[in-house]
Amino acid sequence: MGGMLLYTALIILVVLFIGVSGTTLTWMLWAWRTPEQVVRTAFPPVREPAHSFSLLVPARHEQGVLYDTLAQLAEQDHPDFEIVCIVGHDDPETMAVACRAEAAFSMVSVVVDENWPKNKPKALNTALPVCRGDVVGVFDAEDHVHPELLRHVDTMLQEPDIDMVQSGVQLMNFWSNWYSVRNVLEYYFWFRSRLHFHAAAGFIPLGGNTVFLRTRVLRRYGGWDADCLAEDCEVGVRLSSAGHRTAVAYEPAMVTREETPPSFGSLLRQRTRWNQGFLQVLRKGEWRRLPGPRQRALAIYTLAMPFAQAFAGLLIPFAVVSVLLLKLPVSLTLFSFVPLMLILLTLVAEVVGLGEFGRLFRVRVRLRDYASLVLGTVPYQVMLAMAAVRAAAREYRGDRSWEKTLHVGAHLREAGTGEIG
Amino acid sequence: MTVLDVRPPSGTHRERRTRAQRLRAWLLLHRIDLLIVLGLLTVAAFVQATNLQGWPQYFEDESTYVSQAWAVQTRGQLSHYTYWYDHPPLGWIQMAAWTWLTGAWERLGSGVQAGREVALVANLVSTTLLFVLARRTGMHRAIAVAVTLLFLLSPLSVYFQRMGLLDNMLLPWALGAFVLAYSPRHRLVASVGAGCCLAIACQMKITSGAYLPILLWILWRRTPKPNRRYTLAMYLGSFAFAGSFWGLMALLKGELFPDTPEWFPGDEHVSLLGTQRWVLFIRGGSGGSIFDPESGGYYLIHQSLLSQDRWLLGAGLGAAVMLLLVRRYRWIGVTFLLLCVSIIRSTTLSWPFFAQFLPWAALAVGAVLDTARRGLTRARVPDWAAATAAVGVVALAATQFAATWVERIQLAHTHRSNDPYDEAADWLAANIDPDDTLLVDNTVWIDLVLQGHDPDNVVWFWKLEHDPEIIEKYGDWRSFDYVVSSSFVRDTTHLGMVPQMEKAIENSMPVAEFVEPGFEREAVVIGRVVSGDVADATAVAEPTADAPVTPLLPSSSLSSSPSPPVTASEGYIPEPSPKNSDDRPPDPDLFLPGQELLIRPLRD
């Protein structure tokens, strides 16, 4: 009886693992499912500009990288755009840099955010009233943006009824440390492939930057949720649920380049913040207004995924022990290996992805990068599980403070002097 | 770019309608091919299903696999005796799935017939897949039909496809892998499917691994650059991981590695690597070169195979060589030649392996025809001339083959090769006690067990020779009340591989003999074992035939050849005994259709 119960539990567990690892693998490779699909995920051919843009750049203790970012954004090859840099009233160093850029470039203006405590959605909401463009775009202070991006985004917004556009964001510095290669590939597969699946399936968690929204739509819905740790995801869910359409595109040349968090601690904090933000979005329940049951299911699945992963991570040791120690029937043991096979297949795809990444971005991928990719699998899963547990604990305690990511500009291959915000 | 389209719920309705419309459009688009496949399946079912149990004669391997399928279904074990990794088990697990789903044991009451049913189903799938593959490679519809008909109707096909062989079980999976590799839209998931299908085929019979490089080549050549790397990686990855289960199972059971480096003979611990090492490297030499007229291999090719049909394999070989010059179809030629090389190179000839030659021979012939067609089209030959040429080819082929082919199918539809076995089973059911112990071959084993006889009281004779567990349990031939022997067994006992069986036959008094229609010799003999105790022997229920108590064959002395492994040496050609001139192949002129299994020296 006890045996049967254990077997049943194990079978259910294995089926769940198969579901999670199977969907992860399928969606990760969605963009490559046919050759045409690979081409289809790119930008459509550029048309004449028809929109004006307000690019919001919230910055906090980022005086080391801000000026270059603003200077680079100012070189956008688009006839009609402004840059709004938002700095905190308690951050004179960054403000000084922002003002220097304001003086140097005619399209840059500075907005001071007086809110306390500070976070990104509050900063964005502060700038929203002064935006003059038809479209609001969000960038981070360390972003490296392609000069032709706005023309492409403009073209996408000319497609019928498109109110939101998400373009690719790419971490670059996979060479920096053991987790950076996994972190970089996560972004690669997310923006290159999985986001397109989400768009086609009807539910998207938007990213935090290189995201564009129509100003009037955003204002009508009251801007960003000031209390949400994943304000980017939240606004996307809210607008999608109200029937607004999103377009996503990825082209290696056009991606916004970023860096991985500089330390394990900052990576963990960043991931904790995202997870907690997802949890908040899940609890807020805007996704219930999504039109189809399939979309709602996908929303729950996506938002709860970090926790499913953490749960799986916690259960894997248990499963391994029970498979090895308890004298299970061989057939059941073999069945319990199926998820492992899927995880290994995912690893194969990641190895191929890393090689492709190196070729696309013309960076040499060394053997040790592949080694850290393979060897980092388990520690990275542990990190993800830790972040999920931390997020759940923080949300349970009601602690919603903003643990900001530190940026040093490693993706620009030069030393930065950033601080933790 | 991809657009996230949020529509009101009516959107899903519309989507559903378009799905139905899409299905209709698909059916409409493929209506001709669908009708053709339906027709081909009818032909296949007609040719194969009629008299399925009557012809050809039951083959030891068939009964071994169904016995193992029975063990899977009823006992949850991979074999009715110790599983010893001679073949991966998926082939008979697939059989067990069929017998379980359709209640085949109760429905049929005959073991081998259940296996043949599965072969029939597998062959229907193979037929469909072969047609689809021919179409996907770019062959003209008429040529694809010709390919499929060659595969279905050639005498060798009629013979092989009826039997419940592992090669028939795996063919749908192998062909499925090729069909998937020819995915028209180059879908990534199709490459995963191809890898998994091939992994399944390999876990029915590991020789399917020969297709691995061919499929890799096809995928590499066909897939456009944007998703080529992922396609190849997913194909290889899914093959490797899905294909690892057999080894993983052995590892989990502690049966991957042999205890000792020299596994055979004497090691009582079965192991995958030990058995496979024996199969691949040690047991070799028995088949001999197929070019040596003295060898078993030569005998097999010439007497048993080419006497049935020399045209399909010959034409396939010629076509395969020609295809090396044709870029589009080169891989078909290479595949067929690879199979040929593997047969020539391997030291042990596996008779049922030829079942896998048939689709490739047919495809190779079709590919040459299609190349000729393309040449004619390119040369702007008028349609009427091309049609005349086609009719000419068909007419020529018909005059050459039609008569023999029809004759062969008629034989298959009418001959009752296996009546002796069925009658023997009936006799046993009526005349033996439940407590009687019997030494039998696998065909009788499964039928007796299906009739309700205690499996502990029926022993497959190979196991009494080589399975330490069985030897310990039963001792020797004296423990048995009856011995049931086929003519094949009686003809080969003098080779010394089955001394216990030989003794049992020697010391038995035939109580019933069953003759195949059209033959004079007994196909199956049931003997009462006389273990020295005459009183015991006379207590037999009255014999049905007044047969002499003397053994049916002169017994040769026990051979000193090394003992084969734990169980029947499947795929093993006994060395022709130089001492015994009776072992020479019979005169080909005396060779009668339907008899080949009696004289076939090979077991797989």
Image: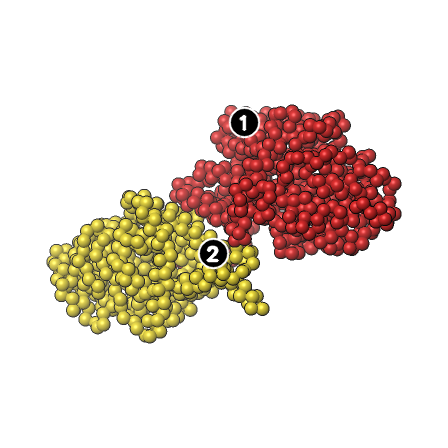
Chain colours: A yellow, B red
For badge 1, the amino acid type reads: Val
Q: Residue A328's image quarter?
A: bottom right
Residue at position x 82%, y 38% from top? Answer: B550
For badge 2, the amino acid type reads: Pro
Of residues B380 and B375, which is closer to you in this image? Answer: B375
As drawn, the residue found furthest toward the front would be: B532
Chain of the residue on which disc 1 is drawn: B
Chain of the residue on which disc 2 is drawn: A
Q: Are marks 2 and 1 in contact (CB under 8 Å)?
A: no
Of residues B94 and B28, which is closer to you in this image? Answer: B94
Residue at position x 51%, y 28% from top? Answer: B324
Q: Which residue is denoted by mark 1 in the rendering?
A: B321
Helix, strand or loop at label 1? It is helix
B549 to the left or right of A202: right
Helix, strand or loop at label 2? It is helix
Mark sitting on residue A339 = 2
A289 to the left or right of B342: left
B84 to the left or right of B307: left
Residue A400 in the image: state x and y as whole percent: 30, 71
Residue A69 visible in image: yes
